[in-house]
Image: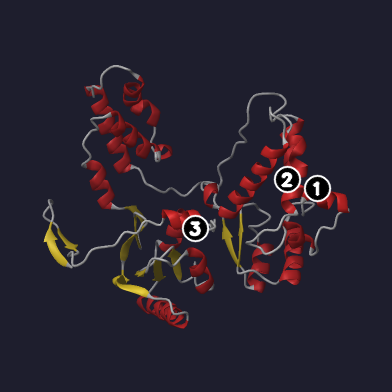
């Protein structure tokens, strides 16, 4: 590392290039391997847990260490004294001695499991740092200044492809930018025209306004869970009538008669007695999971309770795998117009619940009821 002066006359550390990074094309290997849809931690929740601490240690693992492996090694430390995102390790503490003690425990676990770290990219006992494009410190979460500088220096696009690229990236933050569609309208109108490409003064003004909004907008905002929510559907009587009620009823009465804390706790205790206790349970933010009774049982059995966020349903890997499985079954059984999908939903759910799942090592039916689903021979043959 060396210290250099930037354009604003600030002294900044810069890494000297002493060797080259090797890039390997793994696409053929990826095509030949089985996909593992193991969910990564939610970025917003992880940053909220990290922010507000006095000291941090940033450590980097070598490529090839993945989330499932890290969760298995540090299952009793993650979210309490450290965080892991793929091959990046973060140890934190509210005091120097606490952070140092947490670091010692983490390094001891690395030694015990033969886990190698890249010391050249590690930083110890610092009061702030960059995590996933955000600056964390005792003050909380802030946007990385380097990202703001990059956006501020962007020249206006000169091609249709450039406009599409800019609007695509800016659109990612549209929920943080008030009147996004109104501001970007001159640029989108330019894409709709078949006339020669001319980036007008109006488009330049829109581009500058969006750039300014992007530098002001926070990248992550914690949702306000006290706000009301909406159920979105189309306007037909059939969609908002009995069919929707039947589908919701079918999907929410598989294992539990009611969704109150007492029934949920009783159900979990039966699972623990039958299969043992898991390391962690991931739930939504329903009141039947977020209550003192549920927390007491989790503490008693030593189970970590993690909360999913409605803003990132796509990161819940196993749920997405299940949804894709149900979708494939329905696509093969419904008629050409696909109007009969709701009639086939029960059969699709039955087929999915009685099929062997590699991640859990059994069928969902056996996981819930503790035994295999035995059927008459003709039904077993048809299912096969």
For label 1, the residue is 382
Circle 2 residues within 10 Å: few <14, some 14–19, many ≥20? few
* Above/below status of 103 relative to 342: below
Can residue 346 be seen?
yes
* Residue at mark 1 to residue at mark 2: CA–CA distance: 24 Å
Circle 3 residues within 10 Å: few <14, some 14–19, many ≥20? some
* Residue at mark 3 to residue at mark 1: CA–CA distance: 37 Å
The x and y percentages for residue 331 are: 67, 38
* Residue at mark 3 to residue at mark 2: CA–CA distance: 26 Å
The x and y percentages for residue 48 are: 44, 58
The x and y percentages for residue 357 are: 67, 58
Asked if the residues shown at circle 3 and circle 2 are in contact, with their CB atoms under 8 angstroms apart, the answer is: no
Of 95 and 33, nearer the camera is 33
**SS at mark 2?**
helix
The x and y percentages for residue 164 are: 34, 32
Circle 1 residues within 10 Å: few <14, some 14–19, many ≥20? few
For label 3, the residue is 40
For label 2, the residue is 251
Of 356 and 252, nearer the camera is 356
Q: Residue most toward the right?
A: 376
* Above/below status of 284 relative to 195: below
* Above/below status of 309 relative to 126: above
Can residue 179 be seen?
no
């Amino acid at each position: 590392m060396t210290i250099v002066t930037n354009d604003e006359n600030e002294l900044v550390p810069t890494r000297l290039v002493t060797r080259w990074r090797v890039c390997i094309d793994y696409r053929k290997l990826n095509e030949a391997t089985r996909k593992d849809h193991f969910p990564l931690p939610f970025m917003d929740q992880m940053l909220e847990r990290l922010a507000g601490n006095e000291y941090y240690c940033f450590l980097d693992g070598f490529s090839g260490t993945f989330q499932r492996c890290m969760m298995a090694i540090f299952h009793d430390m993650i979210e309490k004294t450290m965080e892991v995102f793929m091959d990046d390790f973060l140890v934190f503490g509210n005091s120097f001695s606490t952070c140092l003690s947490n670091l010692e425990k983490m390094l001891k676990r690395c030694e015990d499991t033969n886990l190698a770290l890249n010391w050249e990219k590690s930083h110890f006992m610092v009061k702030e740092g960059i995590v996933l494009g955000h600056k964390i410190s005792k003050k909380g979460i802030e946007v990385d200044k380097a990202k703001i500088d990059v956006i501020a220096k962007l020249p206006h696009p000169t091609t249709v492809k450039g406009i599409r690229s800019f609007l695509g990236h800016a659109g990612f933050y549209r929920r943080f930018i008030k009147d996004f569609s109104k501001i970007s309208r001159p640029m989108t109108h330019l894409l709709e025209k078949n006339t020669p490409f001319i980036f007008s003064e109006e488009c330049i003004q829109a581009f500058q306004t969006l750039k300014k909004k992007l530098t002001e907008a926070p990248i992550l905002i914690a949702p306000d869970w006290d706000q009301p929510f909406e159920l979105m559907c189309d306007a037909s009587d059939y969609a908002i009538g009995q069919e929707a009620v039947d589908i919701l009823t079918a999907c929410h009465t598989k294992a539990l008669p009611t969704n109150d804390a007492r029934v949920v706790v009783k159900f979990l205790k039966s699972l623990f007695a039958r299969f043992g206790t898991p390391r962690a349970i991931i739930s939504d933010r329903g009141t039947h999971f977020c209550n003192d009774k549920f927390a007491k049982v989790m503490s008693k059995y030593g189970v970590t309770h993690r909360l999913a966020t409605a803003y990132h349903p796509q990161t819940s890997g196993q749920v997405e795998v299940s949804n894709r499985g149900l979708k494939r079954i329905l696509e093969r059984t419904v008629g050409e117009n696909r109007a009969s999908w709701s009639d086939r939903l029960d059969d699709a759910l039955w087929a999915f619940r009685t099929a062997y799942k590699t991640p859990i090592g059994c069928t969902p039916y056996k996981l819930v009821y503790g035994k295999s689903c035995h059927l008459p021979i003709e039904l077993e043959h048809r299912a096969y």
